[in-house]
Amino acid sequence: MQSILNWLDNRTGFRRAVHSVFYQRVPGGAKWRYIWGTVLLFAVVVQFITGLFLWMHYSPSTQTAWESVNYIEHEMAGGSLLRGIHHYMSSAVMVLIALHLMQVVIYGAYRAPREVTYWIGLAMMLVLFGLGQTGYLLPWDQRGFQASQVATNIVGVTPGVGDDMKSIAVGGSEFGHHTLTRFFALHAGVLPGILLVLVVLHAAVGRRHGYTPDEEAADQPDAPYWPDQALRDGVACLAVMGTVLAITMLQPAHLGPPSDATVEFNTARPEWYFRFLFQLLKYFQGASGMFIASQLIPGLIMLVMVLMPFIGKWNLGRRFNTLFVLAVMAGIVVLSAISFHEDMNGETEKSKHYLADLRLAKAEAARAVELASMGVPVAGAREQTRQDPMIAGRRLFKVYCANCHSHHDPSPDDKIADKYDALRNVHLEEPTAPNLYGFGSREWMEGMLDPKQIAGPNYFGHTIFAEGDMVDWVNYSIGDELADLPDDEKKAFQMKVKAAAWAISSLAELPYQREMDEQDSAQIEQGMELVLEEFSCIDCHTLGDDEGGAGPDLTGYGSEEWLTEFIRNPQTERFYYNEDNYDEVDRLMPGFVTHPDDPDLNTLTEEELSLIVRWMRRDWPVAEEEAASEESTPPTTEATEEPEADTSDESTEAADDAEDASEEADPEESEPEATEKSTESEPAPEASTSEETATSEPEASPEEPEASEPDADDQP
């Protein structure tokens, strides 16, 4: 073995190279302040190694980039750990750059004869910044996609050559496949190659002049690098690696939803180490402002840093350099802190909207991962999310329905939320129509038949029907009847009302309620008898073969077919349109698919209509592991008491009185209204907004209105 090593040393001289590294003289002996350069090099090497293994599984195209990163993160053995180390070590690199730069400036390591070493180090810093920026786009998720457009816009404001440089970087006029491949080429090929050359040069030139002497320890003898300084460097490297591993285990690297240029995304932010620049851009408006904030100011800072070896020849200049770097670091910290505070304080309206959008983005990301686990189509994950009722249905509801309707869980805010809550909710601050969360469910129908809720904000409280026939009927036939009953009979009557609500709800055949409906079939059957006989709902509503009055047809109420036809065109006799009963037709909900012979005139396509309906009914595919834990419960957290319905005549008189009540439990205010289109939806034919059809009546009090016997001629 010794002879082989001797032969190899004779040919290569490796012993001298090893000796020059491990026995280099350290001025004043081993010190902790000497560790930063070595630790930074260690972090860069880790990035090279992890990046190489990620490269083996990454596929740089618009249809495979997100999908391959998702595979690495969620399917590949050790993939999440590998990607997490690469992700968080990039942040460690930025921290180490700052610490190493401060060490160099404070101890004057940029002064003669080490100027070239210092300038090479500055060039390495810029390359590492470039690696951080180009890597941000590679997952091809919504966050990186949107934030990278800001970066290319910054390139585009360069005087004279900005447009050409932006076009080269983007690979055209818009972000697409060429953008991704060019960023990948820069991140995995060009910039690492440049960095490797600079590292070799930095090490070679730095080795020539050695460590910067410690002026305060000039009287201490020098010592070799091995073993004391090597031990300190090793401990520091292990500390950095351990920290990165711990963070990776506690918080795996995030992967947002697949990029989609047609969807509005308000939470795009750069990585934390570029937050200062993001905040600085807010103070400068327009293209000229962007140039000042993103190029002129950073350029002047870099110019001063390049000139530091000359400025620092004098003690006063050295003090200036130190104060300048400390001031720049402080400015970066302050601007970053302001940026994070503005987003995360949760007190301002802007912050509240940001946090809500952030929860939505996380929910969409989780849903995209779940969809991918069921198999990604050839068209890619982006197309998969566009066809998913949970994601696309909500987007369409927000565009076309949320100008009038809210769709949010009315249960207490302190309830335990799951990861998909944001995808099931669309909150409208000033609705003019009922809250459609859980439309057709048991809880929704119970609220409809509750005198304390029907005229409240979740039902008819914001509409002209707050004092209409349906509200009067509920107050008179249920509210007054309940008030007149002896205490020992009230619970039995409440159970009848609940059974009737469950019976109507069962007509919707809601997927998340199907199991409960099967279990409670006996109670539902008794409830249907109450609906047909004691409560005499068929006096106003058609239900199956029993034809009623002018009220909406309850046959299949809330089912996929019923809801589809209602949104398609509610202005039919099946629902609420009747010229004899409505004097203000222009205030009724418009149809969204009313031109079967000319689809271009419709507001919604058939596919979009189906997505909205399925989203409202929570009818979407679920992965096996999700299905195993899915609870068959309605979309609210309030517990319901099982009705013990009977068909006694305790409320016959109230039911008889109700025959003259409202002939319409009008669903016009409980279905989606049209709104103007926004960037959140794919292009569709232009439609009139629901502001033309929304009611303008004063908002009713959510408390129970004073009940009065309804007038049979008082039609909505």
Image: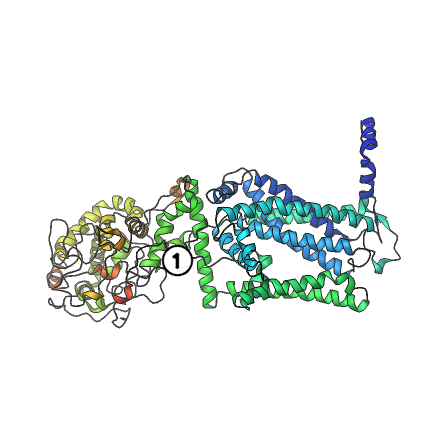
Q: In screen coordinates, is 176 left or right of 701?
A: right
Instruction: Measuring from the top left, give residue 538's x and y in whole percent.
Output: 13, 55
- Is residue 72 left or right of 379 when viewed as pictured? right
Find residue 376 and report its image quarter.
top left
Do we see residue 234 in this rendering?
Answer: no
Answer left or right for 461 relative to 224.
left
Q: Which of 543 and 606 is in front in this view?
A: 606
Depth order, front residue of 462/272: 272
Occupied quadrant, residue 315: bottom right
From this viewpoint, is residue 172 visible? yes
Relative depth, front residue between 319 and 240: 319
- For residue 175, above or below residue 292: above
In the rendered image, the vertical position of residue 393 relative to residue 9, given as above or below: below
Q: Could you tell me which quadrant the C terminus lies in? A: bottom left
Outermost residue toward the front in this view: 160
| Residue 164, image x, y percentages | 55, 55
User: According to the image, label 1 marks what residue?
Assistant: 679
Amino acid type indicated by mark 1: Thr
Observer-nearest of 199 and 655: 199
Q: In this view, does 339 lie to the left or right of 207?
A: left
Secondary structure at badge 1 equals loop
Image mark count: 1
x, y (%) of residue 493?
Answer: 20, 58
Quadrant, the N terminus: top right
Name of the residue lying farthest toward the bottom: 698
* Residue at left offset 36%, top offset 66%: 429
Locate residue 279: give its quadrant: bottom right
Image position of 396 with respect to 384: above or below: below
The colour scheme used here is rainbow
Residue 511 lies, in percent from the top left, at 30, 46
Badge 1: residue crowd in 10 Å (few <14, some 14–19, many ≥20)? few
